[in-house]
Image: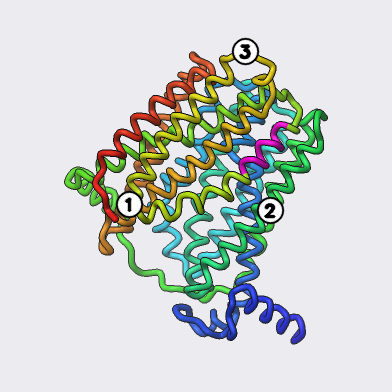
Amino acid sequence: MAGPEISQTRLYEWLTGDDDSRMCRDIPDEACQEQPRNFFLHLAASLGNKLADELASARLVLPWLLGMIGAPLWMVGLLVPIREAGALLPQVFIAGFIRLKPERKWAWVLGGVLQAIAAGLLALLALFGQGGVGGALVLAALVVLSLARGISSIATKDVLGKTIAKQRRGTLMGWSGSVAGGVTLAAGGVLVLLGDRPGELALAALLGVAALGWAVNAFCAARIEEVPGAVEGGENAWDSIKTGLHLLRDDHDFLHFNIARALLLASALALPYVALLGQQQSGTELGGLGILIVVSGLAGMLASPLWGKRADASSRRVMRDGGLGTAVGCLLGAAFAWLPGAWSETVWPYALVYALLVIVHSGVRLGRKTYVVDMAGADNRALYVALSNTLTGVLMLAVGGIVGLLAQWLGSAGLLAVLALMGLAAAASAQRLPEVE
């Protein structure tokens, strides 16, 4: 066993740039001894999670699934709100429960197993789902997926902090993101090669791989060596909510920020409708979905470097530009759907719009995260972030329901025009925010 352990340690030191794998800053000695092994378990778990997230995306794959099984258009409007709100809303309650457990990895395992089961159900629905009933079952599976994601999200961060030392965590997440991005692009490339073949079986296989990814995530989490931690501390969830509501009333800049953030939801809500317009040009063929996955992956890889330095200079301007970019992307998508011509009857125009909106949405996310962290002080930063996330979860559900009804009435293209106006309002609101850098 000594040989494999030495090789693992050397590979860990090469990946992290360490000369000594025993250098640990803020984790116990027992955890430090297991750090190389835990590093690779975290890496494999994160790879499985990121790959599954992309292959069961509520912004891309699930709209394609609903379009393929003939679900009502209003259901598409609920995909992103359920996916995001289900993970955000319960966190203040889940965190208190997880804090009572000395080993938090089992909460992570539970979340991974539930997500794997939900993805397996989605794969079956790709084969057998039909119409409104099939669409309702897709939404029900997504609720389970989303709540499980919230459990895993909190537990993962806690276990990461207990098992991987500072100045190693970013390296870990960077490697996992890079590898997962490459695998996702490869999956999109395979779908493109499938060309004009019927897509029910291929889409089921795609969602089956997502289920396998979350199963790998749970298996690796269970094998992590975690030193039992303290179970004390933390504020009652209801007390946190009351404190947050007082803060929202008294801090006008924070209230203004949350209004701008709510309007910027347009960037996330537009994505599934652009994907649906692309699906309508491809029918049940999955070559078009493969094109969207590839351009989405490439756009995501380009987005972070594009926005990072700009957010450090002025996160307010990044939020403003995100609103303007949302308006441009939505108007382009609507125009492609409305204007006649053979060029608009392929998936490619919608793929380009989708890529633009992915880049814009990355800027929106990065800008608002940077803004709320910079506007808060060290003593209230956690409260600002938690309250803003909870408010966003509530608004996601409310706005998503309205958007779904509008889509049923106006159609996908008409809905994109409405979201363009929402993006312009977001840009105007963000422009009026004070600078916090």
As helix, strand or loop, the secondary structure at mark 1 comes to: helix
**Residue in front for this viewpoint, 291 or 154:** 291
Circle 3 sits on which residue?
A: 340
| Residue 182 marker | 2
Inspect this view and state whether residue 244 appears.
yes
Residue drawn at 63 percent across, 23 percent down = 133
- Quadrant of the drawing holding the N terminus: bottom right
Whether residue 375 is situated above or below residue 7 in the rendered picture: above
Is residue 393 found inside the magenta-colored segment of the image? no
Q: Residues within 10 Å of mark 1 (few under 14, many from 20)?
A: many
Seen from the viewer's position, the closer of residues 93 and 16 is 16
| Part of the protein shown in magenta | 288-296
Separation of residues labelled 2 and 3 (CA atoms): 36 Å
Badge 1 amino acid = Val
**How far across and how far down the image is residue 226, in percent?**
55, 73
Q: Is residue 291 magenta?
A: yes
Residue type beneath disc 3:
Pro
Residue 144 position within the rendered picture, expressed as x and y whole percent measured from the top left: 56, 42
Q: Nearer the viewer, residue 252 or 104?
A: 252
- Which is nearer the N-term, disc 2 or disc 3? 2
Q: CA distance from mark 3 to mark 1?
A: 44 Å
For the residues marked 1 and 2, what is the alpha-carbon distance in whole angstroms?
Answer: 31 Å
Q: Write the residue at 33% across / 56% down.
A: 373
Disc on res. 215: none
Q: Residue shown at 47%/20% (left/top)?
A: 405
Of the residues under marks 1 and 2, which one precedes in the sequence?
2
